[in-house]
Every structure is written in structure tokens, then in C-alpha cells.
Image (cartoon, helix red, strand yellow):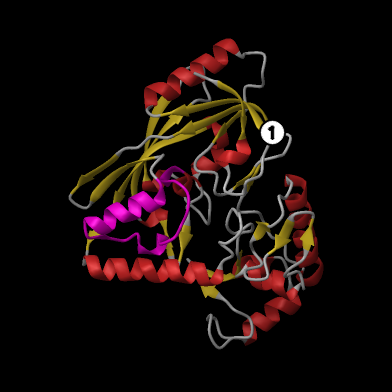
Amino acid sequence: MFYKNVILKSHSHYQIGGPACYFFEAKNVDDLIKAVHGWRRDYSDRRSDAIFILGEGTNVLFDDNGFDGLVLKPNIPTLKRDDCLLTVGAGVSMFQLLDYSMTKSLSGLEWAGGLPGTLGGAIYGNAGAFGGEIKDLAVSILSLDISGSRPKIIKRKNEDCDFGYRSSVFKKNGSKEIILEATLLLKKGHKKAIRESVEEKIKYRKERQPLEYPNIGSIFKNVPLTQIYAEGARNYAESLRKSAFSLRGSATPVKTDPFPLVPTAHLIHEAGLKGVSFGGAMISPKHPNFIVNVLDAASSDVKKLIELVKRSVYGRFGIEIEEEVVIL
């Protein structure tokens, strides 16, 4: 059943967004296939690409004007274990997955402590933190290709998923393909050590990130050193060459997560943008790669700050930064 004019604000961690013309939440593959068939049959006058696949709304900025199409939420709750192999549905939250793995004394996901969103969203954007990425655990991914006249199920091995920095074949294919489930390989560990590591990550996030405000996480990808050198940001690149490649004891912080990167938060800070606001949105003084909703912000407020950051960082350093979030 399609629901009409569903307010996306209530499906967004940002608490921003207008109405979706149509909305459908699927609990299994059959529901998804029926929804796609129904959409094409009954709403064929609409653009064939007017489908958006929604996870938990943790990394998407919805427009206040809404979405003129179908928002499809694959809320598949599968969570099965075979020794160290977990088969996990796209709708399972990272919190649920991490809690389950801790309960079963399975290690490998500790880096995801405090990470919001669903497993489907994590696979889509190859989520990562603290040196870990979801691709390091993924054995295979099951998806539904809806680009043709008849939806078809595809099973890919890890090496066929084209995982990159905050990217995957699924992100490149956009709404032509829907992630259904993933098989992850963890390893046996000690419950107490796993829990302590997870709690350490959660504590770090609470101390360093503005979780007290509605947000969708880091707005921009961090910048690989290779990009900085390739783009000829000479003054900045030279300062990097002279500094130690570590987070501590370096005037220019460079972290390996998962390869040498300059945190975009540092670039935004150096561009003098911490605390800058527009309308109800603000570049967080606590973590400047977060743009937070402090006063019932409009989507246009956030977009203006995103453009300001991109212009300022390029003007100061000659570095083009790229959004990590989806802007609808």
C-alpha cells in the first residue's frame, strides 16, 4: 500500500524535509517487487527514476519542497548467525547489529560504536570510522536490480561491489538497485573487551560530535593526501610534507582512516567557519564538519552553508571537497 504525502521530516535525523508524494515501507523482498510493479503500473506518467531508497535518514538532506516521486524504505529485519557469519537485512540498524554481535561475543564491528543508520545504508556508502570500514567484513551482498522491466535479484561477492572511500557500486547505481541483505564475517572475541571498545567509541563521539542537535553526521568526505597533491594545493601540500603524518604532535592533523587523509573539519576550522550560521542551521563549533539544525532550519539554510564551506575551503587551500551526504 502506497501512502500519500508523507512528511519526510519525520523520517530524517535532520528533522528537515517536506512531503513525499508516495511512500512505501517493505518488510521483505516480495513487498519490494510488488511496490515496484505497482508504481510502474499505476504511476507510469511519472519519471521512471523518481524513486528514492531510504534507510534510517541519517545521511540525507530532504528538500522542504518534498520529493515528487516514491520513497521506498526496505525495512528488512533479517538477522541470522552461522558461527562467525551473520546474514543481516538492510533494515537492521547498526545499533541492533552491534548489540547482537556483542551478545554473541563476535568481534570486528567495534569501530561502529555509536554509528547511526541501517546496515543497508552502511553498505551503500561503505561506512567507516576509527580505521574500520564495512567492506572489511562484507562477504557478499544481495540486492534487487529494478532498472529493467522485471526486477531481478543479484548476489555479489565483496570484490564485485566496487567498494571505495564512502562509496560502492550501489551508491553509483543509485535508485536502480536496492540492497536487501549482506553476509558479514566476524571473528570470535571476548565479550568484555568488545563491549569496552564499543563504549570507548561511543564516548568519543559524544565528546567530539554535536549529538545534542539534529544532524546527519559528517557533511563532507575527508580529503585523501593524494587528492591534495594532485590538485596542486601547493602551500598546503608543502606544509603537510613537513609535518608528521599522525593525529598527535602535528600542526596539520593527518589520520589514516583508512588511508592518509586530512580531516575536512580541520580545513573548515582553518577557513574560519566554526560557528557560522544561516537561518536555523549552523556549522558546529564542536565539530565543523557537522552542520546542525539549531532553530528549525530549512533545507535551503543547510544548502547555503554547504556552498559557503566549499567556496571557502577552495578559496583558502585550492582543495575541492565533496559531500558525503545525499542531497535530495
Query: Mark 1 falls on what kind of element?
Result: loop
Residue 186 seen? no
Q: Residue at x 55, y 11 (%)?
A: 41
As for residue 73 lying within the magenta part, the answer is no
Q: Residue at x 35, y 63 (%)?
A: 110
- Left or right of 11: which side holds 111? left
Q: Residue at x 58, y 44 (%)?
A: 12
**Three-letter amino acid code of the residue under disc 1:** Gly
Foreground of the two, 255 or 54? 54
Find the residue positioned furthest to the front.
Answer: 295
Residue 132: give x, y in percent of width and height: 41, 63
Residue 98: give x, y in percent of width and height: 34, 55
Figure check: 20 above or below 311: above
- Left or right of 267: which side holds 204? left
User: Mark 1, residues whose alpha carbon is within 10 Å: few (<14), some, or many (≥20)?
Assistant: some
Residue 76: give x, y in percent of width and height: 38, 34
- Left or right of 280: which side holds 14? left
> Can you identify the residue that label 1 sits on?
66
- Left or right of 200: which side holds 194? left
Foreground of the two, 254 or 129? 129
Range of magenta residues: 93-120
Foreground of the two, 148 or 13? 13
Residue 245 seen? yes
As for residue 119 lying within the magenta part, the answer is yes
Find the residue positioned furthest to the top.
Answer: 41
Residue 239: give x, y in percent of width and height: 68, 83
Q: Residue at x 55, y 71 (%)?
A: 208
| Image quarter of residue 130 | bottom left
Position of the C terminus, as image quadrant, is top right
